[in-house]
Amino acid sequence: MQFLIPLASAGEPLFKRIYTGLRTSILSGALPSRGKLPSTRELAAQLGVSRTVVVLAYEQLLAEGFVSGRVGSGTYVAHGIGRMYGTRAEKPIDLKLAYYGSAAEQATARVSVRSRRRPALPYDFAYAGCDAEAFPLQAWNRILLRCARKTPMSELDYGLAAGNLALRQAICTHLRRSRAVQCDPSRIIVVNGSQQALDLITRILIERGDAVAIEDPAYQGTSEVLRTAGARLLPVPVDRQGLDPDRLPASARAVFVTPSHQFPTGATLSLERRIALLDWARRRNAVVVEDDYDGEFRYEGQPLESLQGLDPDSRVVYIGTFSRTVFSSLRIGYLVAPSILVPALTAAKWLCDRHTPNLEQQTLAEFIANGAYGRHLRRVQRGNAVRRRTLLDAVDKYLGNRVELTGDGAGAHVALWPRRRVSEESVVARAKLRGVGVYGLATYYLQRPPRPGFMLGYSRLTDGQIHEGICRLAQLL
């Protein structure tokens, strides 16, 4: 046990300073009732003092009843001290938060965080990051162990802020093939999930008071990081074809979009609108931030290439994540930036946390390079396609034309819109009583929502759970 006891203060004997330090630890609860103290020889070695000095301190504690000695065993905190003395209440002080601190604190009250329910609902349509049960954990653990064994001591030091080169190369190869992204490893920065990517982009591009266009409704992680940075948010309505470029404000210096599967409505931005959006960015000298959070999943027709892949002027910053396809707690994402922004983004990453953990990056690089990631991705896509079909059949069977669905052509969730007026809060509360978890869309809107709706994720449910959950929901609608 290591003790930190300040000995530098003058004016009292050395043994008294050690006694005071131990007494404070006992009264504060840092040394619990009946807890064992180090031997006098051990503590003297830790503090660099004579053993005689420590013995005098222990004798004083023993005389006052703070400790008791056991022959052949050692010195222990006296029984009941912890109950006799509570921890001292912290003295309230007036500390003023910076603008960012106040804005971040306020953001937590607005963000709808999907905490794990206890007890879990049997039919929970929560939008989940991935199907953890389908992940090949044993294969991942073998690669992780192999990487740990072969890692040289030199690689235990700080790594590159931009990320492990092998991982950036693997990501580059995958993105070129699966998402038609124009990139090379030098334009890729590895981050701790897509949320950090949004934060870094905002830090280097947005000043307080800057006008920024954003989809309405929008992902709360995007809207709140912009609010906290002091941006002036300009909501742009979303319809079945995604964000409407004709309604983009001329004053915006950036626009944040989810074109492959709009969050949360699920709309896919049409090719015509993609081209119009890029044309707007060129004319306004604006930046487009493309969050491709689940662009890997598409079920009808050919997968649409990324917005970034259509960009001839390098105005798009592309964000991706492995939280939706590997497992959420991995916290590895990436961004592909125009070359002119790479130095600033890399520096911002270094200032934030130096780099993303190296061992996990090495493991993921090999997981992608040896084909395991591709095989896993195909399994997840097939599983999601089956669950999607089950969900559509259940909605058609139990709800019919009483509702409208959007977002069913891609991703891992749909938006369900009742045709008659209902209260989102009431439906969510009553569904919970029936063991069904559904989630209202109103909290994602920056302006007044046009109508009530619900987000239903299906990537973690069985066919039976989907059918029964929709059947119970239908009884409420």
Image: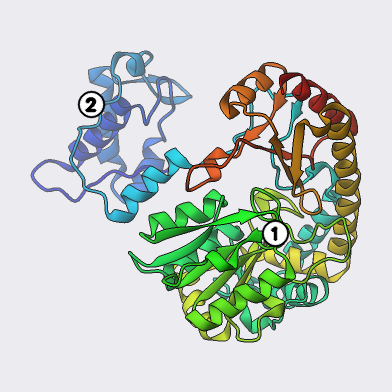
Q: Which mark is residue 60?
A: 2
Looking at the rendered image, the quarter that the N terminus falls into is top left
- 34 vs 50: above or below: above
Q: Which of marks 2 and 1 is in front?
A: 1
For the residues labelled 2 and 1, say whether their Cβ atoms are less than 8 Å apart.
no
Looking at the rendered image, the quarter that the C terminus falls into is top right
| 189 lies left or right of 229 | right
Hey, which quadrant is residue 90 in on the image?
Answer: top left
Where is residue 145? Give x, y as percent: 78, 58
As helix, strand or loop, the secondary structure at mark 2 comes to helix
Looking at the image, which residue is at 55% across and 45% down?
444
| 9 lies left or right of 147 | left
**Residue 353 in view in this figure:** no
As helix, strand or loop, the secondary structure at mark 1 comes to loop
- Badge 1 local density, few (<14 within 10 Å), some, or many (20+)? some
Looking at the image, which residue is at 36% across and 37% down?
40
Mark 2 vs 1, N-terminal side: 2
Residue that numbered label 1 is attached to:
241
Colour setup of the view: rainbow
Say which amino acid is labelled 1.
Gln
Query: Who is closer to the viewer here, 476 or 161?
Result: 476
- Badge 2 local density, few (<14 within 10 Å), some, or many (20+)? some
Say which amino acid is labelled 2.
Gln
Where is residue 286? Give x, y as percent: 49, 77
Q: Which residue lies furthest to the left in this view?
A: 11
Where is residue 12? Give x, y as percent: 11, 41
| 253 lies left or right of 151 | left
- 244 vs 446: above or below: below
